[in-house]
Image (tube, rainbow, N blue to C red):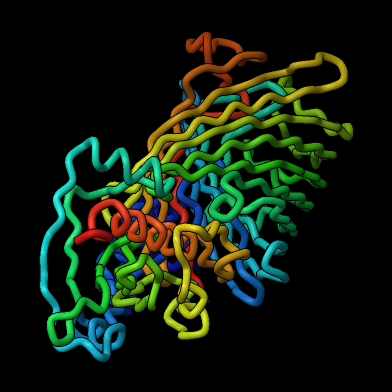
Amino acid sequence: MTFIRPSAMALTLLALSLPALADENLFGYVRGAEVLPKGQVEAYQWFTRRSDKGAGKYRALDSKTEVEYGVTDRFQVSAELNMLSISTSGLVIDGYLPEDKKYGLRPQGIELAAKYNFLSPAKDDFGLSGIASLEYGTRDVHSGQKKTEYEFETGLQAQKYFLEGQLTWVGNLGLRAAYEKRKAIANLPDGVEWGTDPEMEISTKIGTGLSYRFAPGWYAGAEVLREAEYETDVGLERWSVFAGPTLHYGGKQWWATLTYFKQLRGGGEKYAGQSDEHLHLIEKTKNEIRLKLGYNF
Amino acid sequence: MARSSHDWCLFLLPMAAVASPVHASDYLTVPQAQVLLFPAAKSFAEQTLKFDDAQRDRIKAAAGVRQRTGEQKVWRAERDGQSLGWFMVDEVIGKHEFITYAVAISPDGQVLGVEILSYRETHGGQVRDAAWRRHFTGKTLADHFKLDDDVPNISGATLSCRNVMDGVKRLLVVHKLFLAKA
């Protein structure tokens, strides 16, 4: 598979010397309540690097290419293509990470989403929006193995400006339901479990973030996200709390957001021999770094 | 997997974006705005108001928004020794950049006009349109200064509209507290 080297992409952007940036997404993981104005289009490119399960070697890169369109001043729709790259070795987790895997960016899924703004944070003093999305996936983002997944996610985004917008707070609540069926793996070593029965999973998200504009165009902040997954048989199956700093720069057309997310606490299932007792490393990793780029047309 | 697919240069991409030049959109100079807002004036007497903490608190209490700086530069527009009103230049927070604007206030505390000197945001360039700015004309502190009631919102630039509107109200408060009897 042929890739465009990221360094080349950076150089290309430099060479283009496009007028620098501006717009939303002050955070990497939590989302604000604002929507695009009617008729406006915005393109996003996300990269999320997930690494370190405490044993063996694990690195994954998620890519999300998204286009958003403002249908009205309160309602926007979006479509996105998700890609996955993975490199894992020296770690087998029964039922979750069945074998070493290594490949470059490949299509992982597609997603359609809609967002409606009930209250504007600048006009109504308190902003509130709702998002609903549908996703179809063909690869398990944790193991890189093939599977079929249908996912529905809904959430609320609250946003409040302080100091005339110099300080921004956001709060998120989310609920996700997923149906998935894994594809069988040929020649799996004896004793390694890899269930292929259909599964249903429900998960919740609660997150918050605070961002301060310390110079024109520049925002520094922090965000925290708690995710919990539930299954019929066991109830709360696993949970994790990630938190970290966020840096955002926005100009007239482009914006960029960089977030480092570290898992602070986690619980639920653990893999055999897991040394980090208070982390969820079955599916999650210890660290994530997310870069978002946006362009307003 | 090829190592390049996990290339750390991915995370240098913001630098590429940041290195791109910011194209400032400065539309008017202060003298140009003065002429537009006070075409009959023959001179502008400049002075600087300095606010202590207590005065800034009074401004905030009356305007509903903080007085960010401890100084406010003002010009008295004059013709043949008579005051035509006050000209003030102010900055408010836009989505990412400061918005620089000027307000003309009559001696009795009425907005005579608003001009945008600098606007650099992605959306909402319509704040420069005369049709939008005209909504400020005649406003006094007796008005509510509610977005979409007193002044229309511009989609995609709500924060900018809100802050310019609140800024005009704050300058009316400054006029009332410190200039009305000058």
Residue B103 position by quadrant: bottom left
Say which residue appears at 44% left-offset and 42% top-offset.
A162
- Asked if residue A42 can be seen in this view, the reply is no
Q: Is residue A140 left or right of residue B13?
A: right
Q: Quadrant of the N terminus of chain A?
A: bottom right
Say which residue appears at 88% left-offset and 32% top-offset.
A197
In the image, B4 versus A114, the foreground residue is: A114
In the image, B58 versus A174, the foreground residue is: B58
Q: Is residue A144 above or below residue A257?
A: above
Q: Is residue A173 left or right of residue A207?
A: right
Residue A105 position by quadrant: bottom right
Say which residue appears at 57% left-offset and 35% top-offset.
A100
Residue A241 at what x, y percent from top left? 55, 23
Say which residue appears at 82% left-offset and 22% top-offset.
A231
In the image, A277 versus A67, the foreground residue is: A67
Q: Is residue B59 left or right of residue B162?
A: left
Residue B122 at what x, y percent from top left? 44, 71
Q: Is residue A234 above or below residue B19?
A: above
Number of marks in the image? 0
- Asked if residue A281 can be seen in this view, the reply is yes
Q: Is residue B59 left or right of residue B125?
A: left
Residue A230 at what x, y percent from top left? 77, 23
Residue A290 at what x, y percent from top left? 46, 46
